[in-house]
Amino acid sequence: METVQSPVTTTGGGGGGGGSSSTTTPSRYENQKRRDWNTFSQYLRNHRPPLTVAMCSGAHVLEFLHYLDQFGKTKVHNPTCPFFGLPNPPAPCPCPLRQAWGSLDALIGRLRAAYEENGGRAESNPFGARAVRLYLHDVREFQAKARGVSYEKKRKRPKSSTISNATPVTTSPNATATAT
């Protein structure tokens, strides 16, 4: 069965009923964060030898992420697969199903927050370890290559000159101006 959860207090809005209660049900994010934390805690208890959260390192987080791959639903083509790099493969292949990069990234974000909410120090947060960040970066790159999709870094647009911002644009009454 599930563990008993403590109610979350809010300072207005989002509570549903108009009663005088200062507690509400947790948001979807908070529920998911709690479930993720419980799953990770269970993983640590089942680890051989069992681990406590205080003993956990970035390497243990990576083991956990590898463990989760077996439950993934995203087809990730191996480099030897004939469909490697094709966004829409024409036929099935034996490549493994893995966790999608976006799911792993969101999971790490929730666990990073949950770690600190459960008494961990920000400086020693294993979910923010360099090895975890590098792993997520590598997963993102590999999955993009396997699907034939590139994640280009968004470049900041140079600031437009103040003259163009200050000069009003005159148009005919029927014309529409587009923002840049």
Image: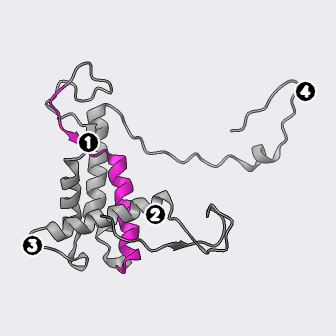
Q: Give how far across and how far down residue 103 sits, in percent.
A: 35, 49
The answer to whether 172 appears left or right of 124 in the picture is right
Q: Earlier in the sequence, mark 1 or mark 4?
A: 1
User: Residue type at mark 3?
Assistant: Pro
Label 4 neighbour load within 10 Å: few <14, some 14-19, many 20+: few
Query: In this view of the protein, which residue sits in the foreground, 126 or 1?
Result: 1
Q: Secondary structure at mark 2?
A: helix
Q: Secondary structure at mark 3?
A: loop
Whole-angstrom CA distance, mark 3 to mark 4, is: 76 Å
CB-based contact (under 8 Å), mark 3 and mark 4: no
Tag shown at residue 173: 4
Tag shown at residue 30: 2
Label 2 neighbour load within 10 Å: few <14, some 14-19, many 20+: some
Q: Mark 3 — residue? A: 49
Task: Determine if the magenta segment contains residue 107.
Answer: yes
Q: Residue at x 32, y 38 (%)?
A: 144
Tag shown at residue 142: 1
Whole-angstrom CA distance, mark 2 to mark 4, is: 51 Å
